[in-house]
Image (cartoon, rainbow, N blue to C red):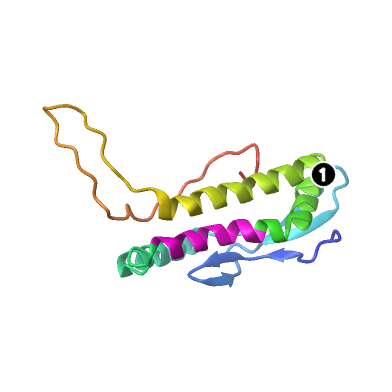
Amino acid sequence: MGGLKQNYWQNYVDGNWVDGGAGRLTVENPGTGEPLAEIALADAADIERAVKAALACHESGVLSSMRPVERGRMVRGMGDYLLANREEIAEMLTLESGKPYWEALVETDGAARYFEYYGNQAETVEGRSIPLGGDYLDFTTYEPFGVSAQIIPWNYPLE
């Protein structure tokens, strides 16, 4: 399958790489039909486990009690991973989507930049309320919102 270092990608749940309950999904090169890699296919039970793990982490306070600079390093670490593996990631994007390799490199670099930017926000955003007027009570609370999940369409898989 392709010339990639890794041919099977698991799901990351509760600090572990795990198989999906619904088996595997083959990612193919649309131009040739050649299999490129397989990815773990999650089912409803996998999603439930992931949400429970995220909620347990949130309720434990481990992240909210962590120094902002440390939380930022965790987020920036994902961008560092993308940059360290940019050629392999760009190759997969090119083979899987048909986009030019140079564009896949730009996309990988751009995604890494997002992680860098938001990782830096963890220690630089001070959080303040903007006054809305005399008839309103404005305040800022320093509590994490909690667990959220999104399923969204995209044009750039990494961004």
| Magenta highlight range | 68-81
Q: Residue at x 18, y 38 (%)?
A: 138
State yes or no: residue 141 in magenta. Answer: no
In this figure, what is the number of numbered marks? 1
Residue 27 against residue 6 in the figure, above or below: above
Would residue 118 be seen by someone viewing this image from the given angle?
Answer: yes
For disc 1, the neighbor class at 10 Å (few under 14, some 14 to 19, many from 20) is: some
- Which SS type dominates the magenta stretch? helix
Give the image location of residue 39, x and y in percent: 68, 60
Residue 147 against residue 6 in the figure, above or below: above
Using residue 17 as the reference point, say whether residue 71 is left or right of it.
left
For mark 1, give the secondary structure: helix
Q: Residue at x 76, y 64 (%)?
A: 7
Q: Residue at x 47, y 59 (%)?
A: 72
Label 1 amino acid?
Answer: Tyr
Residue farthest toward the left in the current orientation of the protein = 135
